[in-house]
Image (spheres, grey):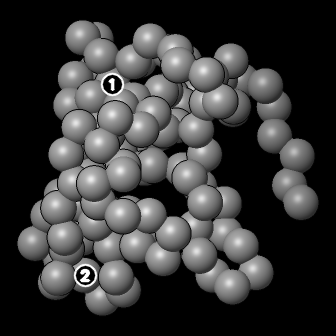
């Protein structure tokens, strides 16, 4: 494992956002959803492709708060531009468990 400086970590904008829209992403190579996440007034709404279909249903994701990296450059994923990275943890079976706060916090709050 590589050691980093605090200043390296401080560059990463890990923010809380609320999922406001979920669409199927049939053109993705692996099963995925397209998420729209509201990161508050300062950052706004960002789109992301998320391979979370194993454990989550579209309807249940609406209103869920998640942790996302909002300062990566956008990335072309098939026909969409992913504007943030919604974070999660891989289980042994390959399913992704979302990283999210256990109590509500304001959209845009920074992990620190």
* Foreground of the two, 5 or 110: 110
Count of picture labels: 2
Q: Quadrant of residue 103?
A: top right
Residue 105 at x, y = what percent? 52, 15
* Side of 98 where 79 appears, left or right: left
Residue 72 at x, y = what percent? 40, 43
Q: Quadrant of residue 42?
A: top left
First in sequence: mark 1 vs mark 2: 2
Q: Is residue 17 visible?
A: yes
Label 1, label 2: how many angstroms apart (C-alpha)? 24 Å
* Foreground of the two, 72 or 52: 52
* Foreground of the two, 28 or 73: 28
Figure quadrant of the C terminus: top right
Figure quadrant of the N terminus: bottom right
Residue behind mark 2: 28
Q: In the image, what residue occupies the spot 10% across and 72% down? A: 79
In this view, 8 is above or below 76? above
Q: In the image, what residue occupies the spot 60% across and 45% down? A: 99
Q: Residues within 10 Å of mark 1 (few under 14, many from 20)?
A: many
Q: Is residue 51 visible?
A: no
Numbered tag placed on residue 39 in the rendering? 1
* Side of 24 where 1 appears, left or right: right
């Amino acid at each position: 494992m590589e050691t980093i400086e605090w200043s390296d970590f401080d560059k990463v904008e890990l923010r809380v956002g609320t999922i406001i829209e979920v669409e199927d992403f049939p053109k993705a190579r692996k099963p995925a959803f397209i998420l729209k996440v509201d990161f508050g007034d300062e950052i706004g709404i960002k789109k992301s492709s998320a391979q979370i279909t194993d454990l989550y249903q579209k309807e249940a994701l609406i209103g869920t708060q998640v942790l996302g990296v909002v300062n990566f450059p956008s990335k072309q994923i098939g026909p969409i531009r992913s504007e943030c990275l919604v974070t999660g943890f891989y289980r042994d079976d390959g399913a992704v468990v979302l990283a999210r706060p256990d109590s509500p916090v304001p959209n845009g709050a920074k992990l620190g």
